Amino acid sequence: MGRGIAKRTIFECREDFRYFQSLLARVMRRGLLEVHLFALLQTHFHLLVRSPVGTLSQAMGDVLRRYARWFNRRRGRDGALFKEPFKSKLVDSDAYRSVLVRYIDQNPVKARLASRATGYPYCSAFHYARGGGPRWLERSWVEQEVKGVRGVEAYDPRDYDVRFPPKLPAPVADWIEDQLLRGRDADLVAPCEESQVAWMVRKALLADGTEPFRLPLPPALVQEEWERLRAQEAEWPVRASRQPEGLWSALHAGLLRRACGLSLREIRARTGEALSTIASRVSRHDACVRESDEYARRAAQVVVCVQRRLTRESHPHRFLPSDADSALTG
């Protein structure tokens, strides 16, 4: 990711876009970089890249330095063009990579540069939807994913939107952006059963007080699942507690803190409650997870439901109805 200094424009005309892409082609030919996805906007850019020889910094540094010099010479300006050299985040799971495709594709739409990413010429979706594109675009992984939708050998551009639907739900898009901007570890938790989640949570808390999930879950989705679970269960059948309302509040605060990674102040901004109240509820949540199987099961149930929703967003084609299902449902 790269952004112009003071949010200034870094791509102002067609030649700017073309020259930047020529620099990407240059490092690709040298074997320093593979570009799988890209979105170039007026004030910033997003790239999904891989460095086969471990020279990401060298390759991107070369691209940005050369581009800044070229940009300045053409306009007679001096000084830095980019806010910082660049930001990068490790992508080490297929699920996260799949969601990133849709996030990167959505950037031109969010910026109101096009109604669909496939209609914006400075975005990789434009080329994937047409089956052509520049030689420097490494298409192997994306095309393999698209071919897997139908289980065919030949790539069909019409299936791109089936594998990577253009509409990414706002809570998921906001969550990804939050992880990227805050520098948090961006990886999706592999979905598992409630019993496994409950076991992992309890063992980790007993061992050192930490949570087993590397990535905070989207607060909006956790909130939705907590509300749905509470609406389904009028009473909380936990024998050790006489205050079911207090347990629901503890679960809410505890999930926002432990599963979403929010600070106490961020939770206060969402709930309007006092910091001392939130801290007390989080402590109670931790104690209940350690001491109550029923409480740990409910906490795990929320986590698993959110994980499954994220899995559906990363691999939506796996959840499409079959032809038989369509015939039955009309």
Image (cartoon, helix red, strand yellow):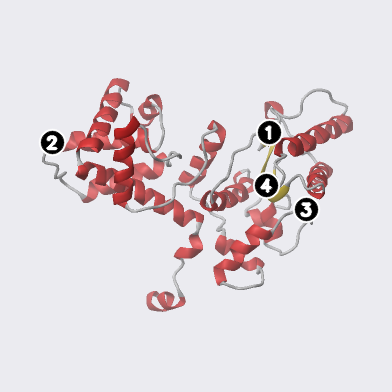
Marks 3 & 1, CB-CB < 8 Å contact: no
251 and 151: which one is in front?
A: 151
Task: Tell me which residue sits at (66%, 38%) in the image.
Answer: 1
Q: Residues within 10 Å of mark 1 (few under 14, many from 20)?
A: some
Q: Which residue is mark 2?
A: 241
Asked if residue 121 is positioned above or below residue 286 in the image, the reply reads below
**Disc 4 and disc 3: Cα gap in Å?**
13 Å
Marks 2 & 3, CB-CB < 8 Å contact: no
Q: Mark 1 or 4 closer to N-term?
A: 4
Q: Residues within 10 Å of mark 2 (few under 14, many from 20)?
A: few
Identified by mark 1, the residue type is Phe
Identified by mark 2, the residue type is Ser
**Residue 117 visible from this viewpoint:** yes
Q: Mark 4 or 3 closer to N-term?
A: 4
105 and 286: which one is in front?
A: 286
Percent coordinates x, y for residue 186 in the rendering: 52, 40
User: Mark 1 against mark 4, which lies toward the viewer?
Assistant: 4
Q: Which residue is mark 1?
A: 86
Residue 50: which numbered mark, if any?
4
Q: Mark 3 or 1 closer to N-term?
A: 1
Identified by mark 4, the residue type is Arg
User: Mark 4 against mark 3, which lies toward the viewer?
Assistant: 4
Residue 69: which numbered mark, if any?
none
Marks 1 & 4, CB-CB < 8 Å contact: no
Side (left or right) of 105 relative to 203 = right
Task: Tell me which residue sits at (62%, 53%) in the image.
Answer: 115
Q: Secondary structure at mark 1?
A: loop
Q: Secondary structure at mark 3?
A: loop
**Disc 2 and disc 4: Cα gap in Å?**
52 Å
Side (left or right) of 61 relative to 296 = right
Task: Tell me which residue sits at (70%, 27%) in the image.
Answer: 5
